[in-house]
Amino acid sequence: MNDFMFVTNSLTGGGAERSMNIIVNELHSRNLKITLVPINSSPRDQVIPECNVVELNREWNGGLLETLKKFMKFHLVVIREKPSVIVLNCDLPEMFGAFLFFGYKKLVVVEHSSFPWKTRMKLGRVVRRALIHKSSLWVCVSDHLKVWPTSNRPNIVIPNPLLSTQENSNRNTSKIISRLVFVGRLSLEKRPDLFLEVCSATKLPGLIIGDGRMRSELENSVLENNLDIEFRGQQLDPWSLFKQGDLVVIPSEYEGDGLVLLEAMARNLSILVSDIPDFRRFDLPKVNYCNSVEDFQNRILTYSSDLQLLKIPEKISEEHLDRRAVVSIGNAWEEFLLQARDN
């Protein structure tokens, strides 16, 4: 029997997946019995899970029949592993967990986003009602999040960990902005299309690190508008591609935990972010917030020769990064899971 099962979309792909890989490794190192179940096929992550891993290998966008097959496989895995607690991360894992019949004791749902189920609201409400009916416990990765659609507070807030909270680097010492960089999933809420507009408005080259449903659309837009933007797809270590003069642009419409911002902070990189509540909670200097393409453009042009002034002050970075130490996050998860198992 494995006491704790973590279910994710895939082995890699986004902040939720990376965070859960870090967490399961930390819990596994403490001799907790852990199983990780990634539903979709994907490449390996930079953080390789060391616990028991059962891959369902669902094809991305595989359709209803493919999803049903993998749900039945998932149910068989649960029956075989007999987990006391199943931790569900993001929409598809939530749906699989909501319709389980037996084989487990307790469900835990991790709220990673300000707007979960945004593209499938009706289905999301059905799934969330089923999870509430099953007396699920709720974990939010940030204290600004609430449990949708009830607006209830979670049972506990546990931030996502970072691999290192002391990875500050001074390698980017250029004063001149020479390239704009986008890191993240190519999906509507991340607004990579706005990033293209900013590159076009500033006439600066761009680098897009990440993948997603919008990639073909974005690549076509780059060709049609003759933009100097390179696509590097999903990378095990996106930060290794950064060069002197790079500016991180994070134009998200909304965020959950804001891991790209935190990881950029940890590397002492220069940053501009969209002016949204999910980023306002970090209390960055006013200069780092932009609320439109024109605002991004003006800020970039104003600081075109003063890139270093767009770095986050060390005091602010340390305040946020100190909370993300893997050991302290592991302590919180261990205590919470053991209590959920034993109650």
Image: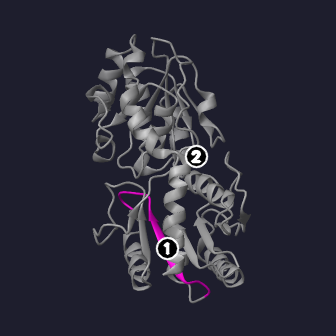
Q: Which residue is mark 1?
A: 339
* Residue 248: % across, % down: 46, 30
Establish if 26 lies above or below 265: below
User: Which residue shows up at 45% across the image and 11% down it?
Assistant: 175
Mark 1 belongs to which amino acid? Gln
Q: Is residue 9 left or right of residue 35?
A: left
* Residue 52: % across, % down: 73, 66
**Which residue is nearer to you in this view: 88 or 327?**
327
Dot 1 or dot 2: first in sequence order is 2
Q: Secondary structure at mark 2?
A: loop
User: Which residue shows up at 42% across the image and 16% down it?
Assistant: 308
In space, the residues marked 1 and 2 are separated at their CA atoms by 38 Å
State the colouring used for the structure image: one colour
| Image marks 1 and 2: residues in contact by CB distance under 8 Å | no
Q: Which residue is mark 2?
A: 211
Q: Is residue 44 left or right of residue 152?
A: right
Nearer the observer: mark 1 or 2; the answer is 1
Whether residue 11 can be seen here: no
Mark 2 belongs to which amino acid? Asp
**What's drawn in magenta, residue-wise?**
103-116
User: Which residue shows up at 55% across the image and 39% down it?
Assistant: 219
* Residue 257: % across, % down: 42, 50
Whether residue 22 can be seen here: yes
Quarter of the view holding residue 311: top left
* Residue 50: % across, % down: 73, 57
Establish if 208 lies above or below 302: below
| In the image, farthest residue toward the bottom | 101
Q: Quadrant of the N terminus?
A: bottom right
**Which residue is nearer to you in this view: 225 or 236?**
236
Instruction: Give the class, few, some or many, for how many residues have Cα within 10 Å of label 1's Cα (few <14, many ≥20).
Output: few
